[in-house]
Image: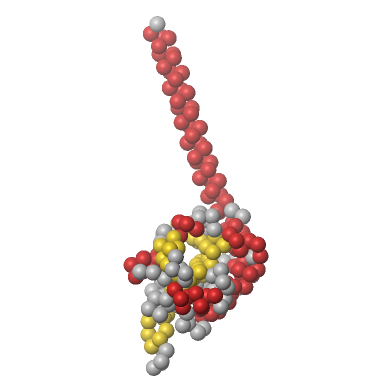
Amino acid sequence: MGTGWWSSTHVRCTERVGRLLVVLLSVLLLEWGGGAARASSHGLLRGLPILPPEPVIDFTLVDQHGRAFRLRDQRGYLVVLTFGFTSCLDLCPLTLGTLKRAYTALGKERRRVRVALITVDPRRDTPARLKTSLGSFHPDFIGLTGPEPERFRLYKSFGVVPERYMLDAHRLVVNHPPAIYLIDRAGYLRVSYNWGGPAEDIAHDIRVLLQN
């Protein structure tokens, strides 16, 4: 009788351990599969791959229509992110022009992409001004501003240090890195382009990341 009790208990414990191992193995395979998919795309990317991919901090800013823009709400979309300001007369227009060409080249795949510029000059870049400026490049482009604590938290995360200075008696400029970032559909920073990049390369990398 004692042996029978031990035997049945042993069987139940073995079954529980077996089920637990199956669950753990399934979780590991899912994690490995996601990581492998992210890793496999690195060799195909033309921009500077972020190794390992880094989760981007969640943030809430305000777009040019006065609506809240939350990164967590963009899951499932690839987000193209850059920093700039509407009064910029050189690098920012070049960057936005490049993004316009890349975005246009995507064709129907554009519906899964969000292109956003975060202002480094919030004193002048009101939502209305962002709407006018970005709309001149593409009506889908998103201009973002917001409260200083949220902006500076995001600046710090991307290593952006806006520097305001007078170029001459009439022109205020804001120095900032002219970089472009690709955030995948799971919210991971995957690729960056220092000093912009060829539109063809950006469109290519967006397509690669959309497949993962």
Residue found farthest to the bottom = 169
Give residue 12's quadrant in the image: top left
Relative to residue 95, is residue 171 drawn left or right?
left
User: Which one is in front, 181 or 117?
Assistant: 117
Q: Position of residue 86 (x, y in %)?
A: 47, 79
User: Which one is in front, 203 or 64?
Assistant: 64
User: Which one is in front, 75 or 155?
Assistant: 75
93 above or below 113? below
Please count the marks in the image: 0
6 above or below 43? above
Q: Position of residue 171 (x, y in %)?
A: 42, 89
Which residue is rendered at x = 47% and y = 69% of the image?
65
Q: Position of residue 191 (x, y in %)?
A: 53, 63
Query: Can residue 176 be seen in this snapshot?
Result: no
Q: In the picture, which quadrant includes the N terminus?
A: top left
Which residue is rendered at x = 44% and y = 65% of the image?
67
